[in-house]
Amino acid sequence: MIGSGSLSWERPWNRKTVGAMLLLVFLPNILSMVNLPIPGGLKIHTFPVAIFLAASLLGPLGGLLSGLIGSLFSALTLANPYLIIGNGILGFFIGWFLRCGRRPLLAVWMAFCLQLLWLIPADYYLAGLSAAFIQNLVLMLFLSNTLWAVGAARLNRPLKRWLA
């Protein structure tokens, strides 16, 4: 264990840890190509599950890296570089809240609230998105974040045992 603070890297560096880090940092780019349509014309994004896993397995810094690097494809295809920062915020704070003892779903919701402090003004003022679009985006992100938080929480314990 390196350090003991809430920002420290809690896993020893080994082949499994490095492999998990690389996978969870680049996997969101691949998953961002897959969106699940739901009624109402909204789409559930699949990339957050990798960010949530990185944050839960590798802590705040793992979540931050997964959010930042894992958003590159989406940022390029949507011509919105600001979402890189928003996903970095999301990943970092999920890891932070989990390290502070919050339950996974609550950690994701709290981190999402902090992400919204960046997302809404950045998308409206910097990316020029309409308020109606942002409203639908926030709803869709809340739904997908909730879904993947539950899924990631179920995978967390077996993956931590595998990394040990």
Image (cartoon, helix red, strand yellow):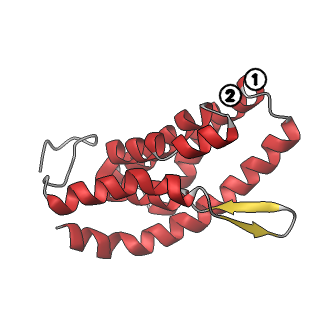
| Residue found farthest to the top | 125
Residue 93 appears in the picture as rendered: no
**Badge count:** 2
Residue 2 percent coordinates (x, y): 12, 45
Residue 67 vs residue 93, the one in the foreground: 67
What amino acid type is highlighted by mark number 1? Tyr
Residue 83, quarter of picture:
top right
Three-letter code for the amino acid on which mark 2 is drawn: Ala
Would residue 106 be found to the left or right of residue 60 on screen?
right
- State the quadrant of the C terminus: bottom left
Q: Residue at x 88, y 42 (%)?
A: 132
- The reply to whether dot 2 and dot 1 touch (C-beta < 8 Å) is yes
Q: Is residue 60 visible?
A: yes
CA separation in Å, label 2 and label 1:
5 Å
User: SS for tag 1?
Assistant: helix
Percent of width and height locating residue 49: 50, 62
| Mark 2 crowdedness (10 Å alpha carbons): few <14, some 14-19, many ≥20 | some
As drawn, 107 above or below 127: below
Left or right of residue 161, residue 111 in this image: right
Q: Is residue 79 above or below residue 51?
A: above
The residue depicted at 73 percent of the width and 48 percent of the height is: 138
Q: Which mark is residue 125?
A: 1
Nearer to me, 73 or 153: 73
Name the residue tied to disc 2. 122
In the drawing, does residue 124 fall left or right of residue 71? right
Q: Secondary structure at mark 2?
A: helix
* Residue 66 percent across, percent down from the top left: 42, 47
